[in-house]
Image: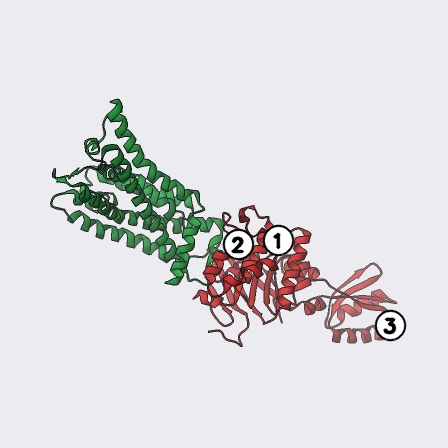
Amino acid sequence: MTDQAAPPIEVRGLVKRYGTLEAVAGVDLTVNAGDVYGYLGPNGAGKTTSLRMMLGLITPTAGSVRLFGRDPITSVSALEGVAGFVEAPTFYSYLSARRNLELLAAYDGGDARSRIDAALEIVELTGRQRDRVGGYSHGMRQRLGIAASLLRNPRLLLLDEPATGLDPGGMRDMRRLVRRLADEGMTVLLSSHLLGEVEEVCNRVAIVRRGRVVYEGEIAALTRAGAVLRLRTSDDTIALAVCEAQPGVTGVRRVRDHLELTASEDAVGALSQSLIDAGALIHELTPQSATLEDVFFSLTEGQDAAPAAVQ
Amino acid sequence: MSGIATVYRWELAKLRYQKRTYLGLAMAVLVPLLFVLAVHLRRHHERGGGFAFSDYVDRSGLAIPLVVLLFGAIWLFPLIAALVAGDIVAAEDQGGTLKTILTRSLERWQVFCGKGLIALSYACVATFLCGTVGVVAGSLQSGFNPLQSLSGTIVSAPRALLLVYVSLAVYLIPIAAVVCIGLMLSTITRNSAAAVVGTLMLSIIFQLIGILPGLSSLQPYLLSTQFNAWQGLLRTPIDSQPIVRAAWVCAIYAALSLGAAFIVFMRRDVNG
């Protein structure tokens, strides 16, 4: 039974070990209805393994996955209203695209078969539906993967790097397609390492590093939190000392004719007062907007990347 | 049950597009024709020598399918059975399509049952095709004549024809066990070639064990021995004892193989 109040995806303490290798090391995330949720991380971070567990393809070592409140590990019926693919979507290369979709529609049952034409139309493969999938380009297979997902009339779509391997035009089309599906009310989880893609189409993200979520929340909040302030004063030496001593101000560094620092809005107010009190007149104090890429690298690179900052 | 029927129907459709399907069926057609050709050459050109039971096939074309059953037990029928059974899960794994079908609305056990049934069906079709080609080609070559039973009595042609088809049915008992072994290797190895070759190797190993001195006590329980159970039908009176033994011995082989395959398939992580 679907729990109407349950979020489309709720993952708690998800762990997957292969011998001594911990591919997923305790992932917690919640995808709410209507989210276009970016699941970000470098290669090997555990994204695909997490998605496999969400789709019931592999059994977690520990933790739980709930899709609309149901456990996909115990029964495939938990995937009702859920569709997607992990890694590249795969089909029977010796069958035509249409025959592949007919097979999958038969496996889905219900009125899935009646959606084949519409699904092919959406991904713009109607004209090539009779061709064998073996002759399809990578991009066409990716689009066919979306079409196969749409047969299930999903409320939740899980896509694992759908734009990987596509040319710029294909990537743009894929972004538009995902955006369009989201606009139609579909909840989407988009696993990717293409930051621009995620920043363009997603409203929330989880960033994973070495099998752990190091950030989960709104992209806007993430980039705001990661924003750097540019400070120019009448005396940067005094200003540097004030900034370093000021509570709530971090990452202070001198860059040519100015300082860079990060601080919360409250800390900025206090800092302004402290600078004036110390005799350093403020010529400029402006936020330098951080991109998702800036934040992503700050969270995922280095020996001791930021600890989990789940919001 | 409709889920299993769906898988069965689509597995059948997929078989139509795969070369291995036709390879196995071609072998099932070709081998009895080769026997008929051998009989023809021997009779008309006085060369090529005789082969076991060649006198039988000279007198009645209905002996051809039975001779093929006798020789086919060593590699022909195990290979035909393994071609589909050994490939049916492993090919999905290697091609990455297992994850595609396991994220639809059918349960894993339904997919497994559908696949197992189609592998069994294929082996049945190939066996009966082989027998039918043998009957037709043999009758054209040596005539639709009465058949001499293994007890020396003469069986009328219509009754002999019935016995041929019942023999084919009995032959399916060990073939079903081979299908289950193929399915197990296909599921466990996740590699089509390894599963097909492995199934054939196991069949040959059973044959080898059967001829090794000192291991004769094992012979009644070897899978290879059960391929001779049909011969009980050609005795007067019919000897049902080897058929009954084939049924329970093969049931054990099948249950163990199928059980292992089922457990692995249900619990496996699909990483491909």
Q: Chain of mark 3?
A: A
- Residues at marks 1 and 3 on the same chain: yes
Chain B drawn in what color? green
Q: Nearer the viewer, residue A12 or B88?
A: B88
Chain A drawn in what color? red
**SS of the residue at dot 2?**
helix
Disc 3: which residue: A279
Residue A58 seen: no
**Which mark, residue A164?**
1
Q: Nearer the viewer, residue B236 or A14?
A: B236
Tag 3: amino acid: Gly
Between circles 1 and 3, the one closer to the viewer is 1
Disc 1 from disc 3: Cα separation = 54 Å
Q: Is residue B190 above or below residue A223?
A: above
Q: Is residue B12 above or below residue B235?
A: below
Sequence order check, earlier mark of 1 and 3: 1
Sequence order check, earlier mark of 2 and 3: 2
- Could you say where residue B136 lies in the image, as x and y percent from the top left? 28, 39
Q: Nearer the viewer, residue A214 or A176?
A: A176
Tag 2: amino acid: Arg
Tag 1: amino acid: Thr
Disc 2 from disc 3: Cα separation = 75 Å
- Could you say where residue B28 lies in the image, as x and y percent from the top left? 33, 40
Dot 1 and dot 2 residues touching (CB under 8 Å) = no
Sequence order check, earlier mark of 1 and 2: 2
The residue at the point 51 percent across, 52 percent down is A91
Disc 1 from disc 2: Cα separation = 23 Å
Disc 2: which residue: A98
- Could you say where residue A135 lies in the image, as x and y percent from the top left? 56, 46
**SS of the residue at dot 1?**
loop
